[in-house]
């Protein structure tokens, strides 16, 4: 089964082509961009070209559903639905935090705290072990996070709030690839169960920034 994995939940748009039976990644493209609507489909084309595959051969489209940026998650989900509809491929979904933790877990770390910068002075965080997730998703200030025992702390949230989060465990150097969400991480961590289009629901965790700004706008009030 040929898999096309994609994620736009963070400022990095990432796409991978992989073999489903072995989870072998044939090609991966990651692009730092603030415009997922402009970069996601070109990244898909590039990844397929690098893998020597065609879109028509894709049997499963795997998409990261967050948490992360509201717009990026929606663009990725809409793109996945469109690609699946055009090709007849099945759909699968996966947590972006699970994808972030996956490379560290596969690299031998047994306890990983995945942390994404949620803006507004907050982070999205979730703890994982070799057996799977061990906590729900936290959305709070980095100073408020509390864990029992040390973990490897990874993600752009760990980089931004290194001083506040270093008490929770080891944080790799800022340039470490373990801090980046990758489509390969989705391939490693997803269960690949098929879901319906209506089940491709984003994990927002909290109210989108646009809704908060609208509530603060006096002209939007009745």
Image (tube, rainbow, N blue to C red):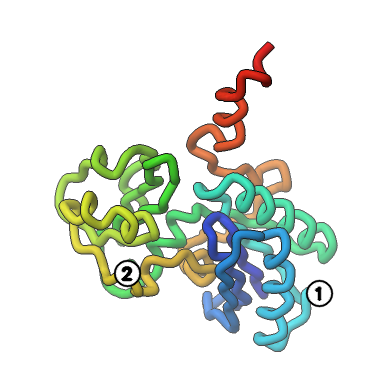
Q: Can residue 83 be seen in this view?
A: yes
Disc 1 crowd, CA 10 A, few/some/many (<14, 14-19, 20+): few
Tell me if 18 is positioned left or right of 120 in this view: right
Residue 141 at what x, y percent from top left? 32, 39
The reply to whether residue 129 is visible in this rendering is: no
| Residue 34 percent location from the top left of the image | 60, 60
Looking at the image, which residue is at 50% across and 68% down? 182
- Residue 92, percent from left and from top: 63, 56
Q: Is the residue under label 2 in contact with that under label 1 (CB below 8 Å)?
A: no
Q: In this view, does 205 lie above or below 16?
A: above
Q: Distance between the residues labelled 1 and 2?
A: 39 Å
Reading the image, the residue beneath label 1 is 56
Q: Nearer the viewer, residue 58 or 112?
A: 112
Q: Give the mark nearer the N terminus: 1 vs 2.
A: 1
Q: Would you say 158 lies left or right of 194 here? A: left
Which image quarter holds the N terminus?
bottom right
Say whether residue 8 is left or right of residue 160. Answer: right
- Expressed as whole percent of the image width and height from the top left, the position of residue 210 reads 61, 35
Using the image, tell me which numbered label, if any, was put on residue 174: 2
Observer-nearest of 121 and 28: 121
Q: What element carries label 1?
A: helix
Residue at left offset 69%, top offset 11%: 222
Looking at the rendered image, the disc whose residue lies closer to the viewer, 1 or 2, is: 2
Q: Residue at x 25, y 59 (%)?
A: 111
Give the answer, above or below, for where 199 lies relative to 40. Answer: above
């Amino acid at each position: 089964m040929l898999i096309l994995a994609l994620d736009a939940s963070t400022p990095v748009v990432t796409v991978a082509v992989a073999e489903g039976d072995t989870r072998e990644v044939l090609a991966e493209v990651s692009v730092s961009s603030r415009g997922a609507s402009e970069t996601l489909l070109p990244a898909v084309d590039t990844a397929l070209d690098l893998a020597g595959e065609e879109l028509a051969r894709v049997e499963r489209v795997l998409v990261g559903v967050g948490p992360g940026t509201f717009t990026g998650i929606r663009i990725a989900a809409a793109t996945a639905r469109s690609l699946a509809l055009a090709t007849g491929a099945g759909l699968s979904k996966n947590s972006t935090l699970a994808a972030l933790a996956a490379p560290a877990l596969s690299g031998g770390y047994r306890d990983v705290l995945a942390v994404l910068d949620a803006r507004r002075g907050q982070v999205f965080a979730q703890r994982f072990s070799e057996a799977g997730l061990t906590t729900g998703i936290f959305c709070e200030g980095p100073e408020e996070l509390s864990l029992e025992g040390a973990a490897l702390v990874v993600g752009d949230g760990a980089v931004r709030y290194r001083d506040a989060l270093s008490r929770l465990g080891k944080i790799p150097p800022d340039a470490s690839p373990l801090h980046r969400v990758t489509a390969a991480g989705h391939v490693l961590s997803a269960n690949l169960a098929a879901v319906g289009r209506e089940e491709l629901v984003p994990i927002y965790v909290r109210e989108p920034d646009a809704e908060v700004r609208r509530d603060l706008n006096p002209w939007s009030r009745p």
